[in-house]
Amino acid sequence: MQTGYDTNARPATQTLVSGSTTYALTQTSYDALGRPECVAQRMNTAVYGALPTSACTLGTAGSFGPDRITKTFRDAAGQATKTTTALGVTGVEADGVAARDTFNGIVQAVTRLAATCSRFARRPGIACSIMALIRCPVWID
């Protein structure tokens, strides 16, 4: 695994390389306050050398389909309120979990927004925020 850094010394790309072949690339972009905003699993190996400036931007689709982009939305206090998966992919984009906080930052309610999110089966890549589940295990459907 090789890591590339942006001008602020934050991890911007992670590549899986063997010999001279790159097999996978993940790109991360940050908001103005340095918090991760988007993480993109780039799917077209032919354009790894010419990535979009932001991980929030879809690259050219390849034989493995469009990029897998996850974007985290935050409120004015910096709390993650929503996670969107498949960002920019028409018909597939889905919101994961939205949290509603009280005035003191404690999660008051969590709303399940994605139909693919099961309360009992959690797998990596599913649009559920495990942090939200731990903080507030009561669902509002």
Image (cartoon, helix red, strand yellow):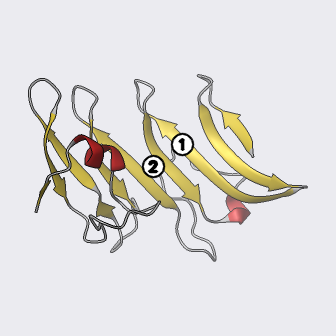
Mark 2–mark 1 distance (CA, rounded to whole Å): 8 Å
The local secondary structure at tag 2 comes to: loop
Residue 18 seen in the figure: yes
Which label number is shown at residue 56?
2
Q: Which of 97 and 70 is in front in this view?
A: 97
* Circle nearer the N terminus (2, 1): 1
Q: Which residue is drawn at 47% across and 60% down?
A: 124
Identified at 41% across, 26% down, the residue is 32
Give 132 or 96, whichever is nearer the viewer.
132
Q: In which quarter of the image is the C terminus?
A: bottom left
Q: Position of residue 132 (x, y in %)?
A: 27, 45
* In this picture, residue 137 sits left or right of residue 109: right
Does 87 appear above or below 136? Answer: below
Q: Name the residue under label 1.
A: 28
Please report the residue visible at 43 percent of the width from the left and 30 percent of the height from the top: 35
Q: What amino acid is at disc 1?
A: Thr
Q: What element carries label 1?
A: strand
Mark number for residue 94?
Answer: none
For the residue marked with disc 2, what is the amino acid? Cys
x, y (%) of residue 16? 74, 53
Task: Decide: is 20 above or below 28.
Answer: below
